[in-house]
């Protein structure tokens, strides 16, 4: 069975033969992306801390249960622990780089 082909939708021969190489980001772009990622992560941890404070206030007013407060506080604690471990690994990597002999 022969199917009709629309040749206008095919890619050009150049793109099939020699696909374009992805452009690697510059070190400055990579640093900016990494710093924005870290900034967003730290903002998320701060937001969770604020959420725990709000949940504690709501608990005192009787608006939420103790389970909800405990879950929110555990999530915030785990986020803070993860942030601390990432910081420790970054410091460890920096110290390893500084010990490298040139």
Image (tube, rainbow, N blue to C red):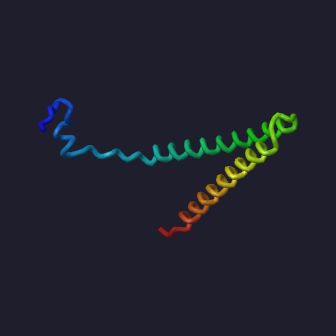
Position in image of residue 85 (x %, y %): 64, 58
Position in image of residue 51 (x %, y %): 74, 39
| Residue placed most toward the observer, 1 or 96 | 1
Question: Which quadrant holds residue 92?
Answer: bottom right
In the displayed orientation, state which residue is furthest to the left. Answer: 2
Q: How many marks?
A: 0
Question: Residue drawn at (61%, 59%), measured in percent from left and top?
Answer: 91
Question: Which quadrant holds residue 3?
Answer: top left
Question: Residue drawn at (60%, 41%), measured in percent from left and top?
Answer: 40
In the displayed orientation, state which residue is furthest to the front. Answer: 1
Position in image of residue 12 (x %, y %): 18, 36
Q: Is residue 4 left or right of residue 85?
A: left
Question: Residue drawn at (14%, 32%), measured in percent from left and top?
Answer: 4
Question: Which quadrant holds residue 41?
Answer: top right
Instruction: For the N terminus, give its image quadrant.
Output: top left
Q: Is residue 31 left or right of residue 26?
A: right
Question: Residue drawn at (47%, 68%), measured in percent from left and top?
Answer: 102
Position in image of residue 101 (x %, y %): 50, 70
| Residue placed most toward the observer, 73 or 89 | 73
| Residue placed most toward the observer, 69 or 93 | 69
């Amino acid at each position: 069975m022969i199917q009709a082909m629309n040749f206008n939708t095919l890619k050009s021969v150049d793109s099939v033969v020699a696909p374009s190489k992805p452009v690697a980001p510059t070190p400055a772009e990579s640093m900016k992306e990494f710093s924005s990622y870290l900034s967003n992560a730290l903002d998320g941890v701060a937001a969770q801390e604020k959420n725990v404070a709000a949940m504690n206030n709501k608990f005192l007013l009787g608006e939420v249960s103790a389970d909800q407060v405990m879950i929110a506080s555990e999530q915030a604690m785990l986020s803070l622990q993860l942030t601390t471990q990432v910081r420790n690994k970054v410091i460890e990597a920096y110290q390893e780089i500084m010990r490298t002999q040139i």
